């Protein structure tokens, strides 16, 4: 199946710093990628939809200036958590939708665990 | 907000038994998908059932979909200790535009299979 990678797999940072997380589709092109956040023992919450070559679409309640998304190519989307605070500590997961007709499956990355001290 | 509700929230069974998890949703869908997540890891896609399908099988997995009741079930037969994980349903809502491809996840069921 299609492979999606994320980097880094985990990161610890100080409060106030910015952290960039990369999401790559390794063997397919993805016009659209999605970013989710998952708190411990909870489900995935969609944060934003990342579209190649255009601005991301953010879900209600997600601050676009805090969570910067860039989808510069068909295989790479980045999420930057700006001025991170302890409450931003979470598991961030991206997914990519295969860019083919009748392909509805999304492929998920392994996730990035962020701890803000 | 999450539209999916799953039950039970937690399920504990013995190896060899069957495990059934249920999922309900609120809007019209294109398809419903089930995913598995091992503790602290990414999601693994298990099975997708389209809105015009009622039942689907994949190995030891059986998924049903009742669009009139807006509900789905996932049955894992002859469970193994390695099936221990969290299981999530996710709906792909109808409608294009900004809804295209967006998945809404249920709260998940934590399955524990004891050897």
Image: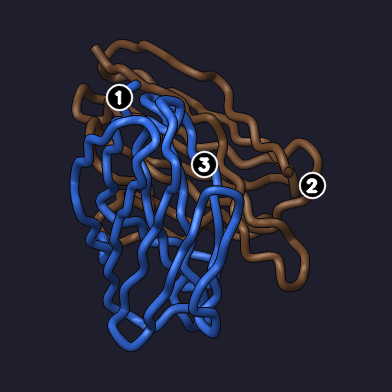
Residues marked 2 and 3, same chain: yes
Chain in blue (letter) = B
Q: Which residue is mark 2?
A: A28
User: Eyeballing the image, is B73 above or below A24?
Assistant: below
Q: Could you tell me which residue is drawn at 55 percent across and 67 percent down?
A: B56
Which chain's residue wears label 1? B
Tag shown at residue B69: none
Which color is chain A depicted in?
Answer: brown
Q: Nearer the viewer, mark 1 or mark 2?
A: 1
Camera-side residue: B101 or A102?
A102
Q: Position of residue A51 (x, y in %)?
A: 61, 58
Tag shown at residue B114: 1
Quadrant occupied by the N terminus of chain B? bottom left
User: Eyeballing the image, is B86 above or below A112?
Assistant: below
Camera-side residue: B93 or A7?
B93
Tag 2, which secondary structure?
loop
């Amino acid at each position: 199946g299609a492979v999606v990678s994320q980097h880094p797999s985990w990161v610890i940072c100080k409060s106030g710093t910015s952290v960039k997380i990369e999401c790559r589709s390794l063997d397919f092109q993805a016009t659209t990628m999605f970013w989710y956040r998952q708190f411990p023992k909870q489900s995935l919450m969609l944060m934003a939809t990342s579209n190649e070559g255009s601005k991301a679409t953010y879900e209600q309640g997600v601050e676009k200036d805090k969570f910067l998304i860039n989808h510069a190519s068909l295989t790479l989307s980045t999420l930057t958590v700006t001025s991170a605070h302890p409450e931003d500590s979470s598991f961030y997961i991206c997914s990519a939708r295969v860019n083919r007709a009748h392909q509805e499956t999304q492929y998920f990355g392994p996730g990035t665990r962020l701890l803000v001290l | 907000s999450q539209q999916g509700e799953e039950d039970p929230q937690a399920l504990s069974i013995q190896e060899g038994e069957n495990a059934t998890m249920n999922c309900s949703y609120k809007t019209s869908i294109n398809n419903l998908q089930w995913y598995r997540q091992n503790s602290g890891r990414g999601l693994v896609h298990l099975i997708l059932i389209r809105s015009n399908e009622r039942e689907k099988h994949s190995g030891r997995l059986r998924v049903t979909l009742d669009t009139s009741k807006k509900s789905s079930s996932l049955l894992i037969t002859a469970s193994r200790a390695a099936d221990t994980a969290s299981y999530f349903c996710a709906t792909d809502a109808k409608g294009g535009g900004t809804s295209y491809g967006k998945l809404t996840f249920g709260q998940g069921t934590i399955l524990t299979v004891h050897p």
